[in-house]
Amino acid sequence: MKEDKEIEKILLNDENYEKFINSKNEKDYIKVLEGEKKKSELVITDIKKLPKDVLFSRESVFVVINKISRTKSYINGIQADGFLAGQNVLRDRLKSGATDSFISGNCYIKFYKYKAVV
């Protein structure tokens, strides 16, 4: 009962309610920031050190160089897997770390890095 009256007083007085809400939001924001500080990034640039199951994932980055237009772009591992289109031997060589690049049509595709938040 006593708590209800205190809450009612806070709700009736807009200034106190705003202070309460602002302090609660600030505390929540500080908790989020502290959680972000604890996270670290894992970056692997050597394909031989990369686990096989993450090579063709969203966290993997490949460089694509078009031989005709001489342009360079970046794709993720899922898109790189699409460039392989049934070349299972080459896919296995990439997973084992025997090679880090391949050619598909007019494009030269090379493993660049794997980046994940740990």
Image: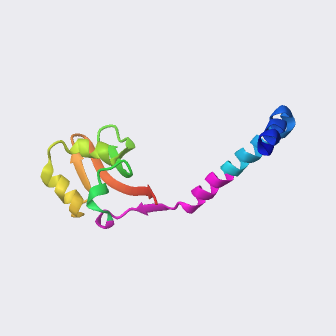
Q: Main secondary structure of the magenta part?
A: helix
> In this orientation, which residue lies closer to the viewer: 114 or 117?
117
Numbered range of the magenta stretch = 30-49
Residue 33 image-quadrant placement: bottom right
Q: Looking at this view, is 80 or 30 the one in front? A: 30
Q: Is residue 69 magenta?
A: no
Identify the residue at horizontal 24%, vertical 63% (top origin).
97
Quarter where residue 111 is shown:
bottom left
Which residue is located at x 21 percent, y 63 percent? 96
Check the image and report above or below for 33 versus 86: below
Q: Position of residue 28 (x, y in %)?
A: 67, 49
Q: How is the image coloured?
A: rainbow
Locate residue 96 relative to residue 14 in the image: left or right: left
19 vs 55, left or right, is right
**Is 13 situated left or right of 35 in this image?**
right
Q: Residue furthest bottom?
A: 49
Residue at 26% from the left image edge and 60% from the top image edge: 52
| Residue 34 seen anywhere in this rendered image of the structure | yes
Give the number of callouts. 0
Front residue (pair 18, 87): 18
Q: Residue at x 28, y 47 (%)?
A: 108
Rendered location of residue 93, percent (x, y): 18, 59
Position of residue 65 measured from the top left corner of the image (x, y, whole percent): 33, 45
**Is residue 18 something one can see in this rendering?**
no
The answer to whether 66 is drawn above or below residue 48 in the figure is above
Q: Position of residue 48 (x, y in %)?
A: 29, 66
Q: Quadrant of the N terminus?
A: top right
Is residue 8 shown left or right of residue 67?
Answer: right
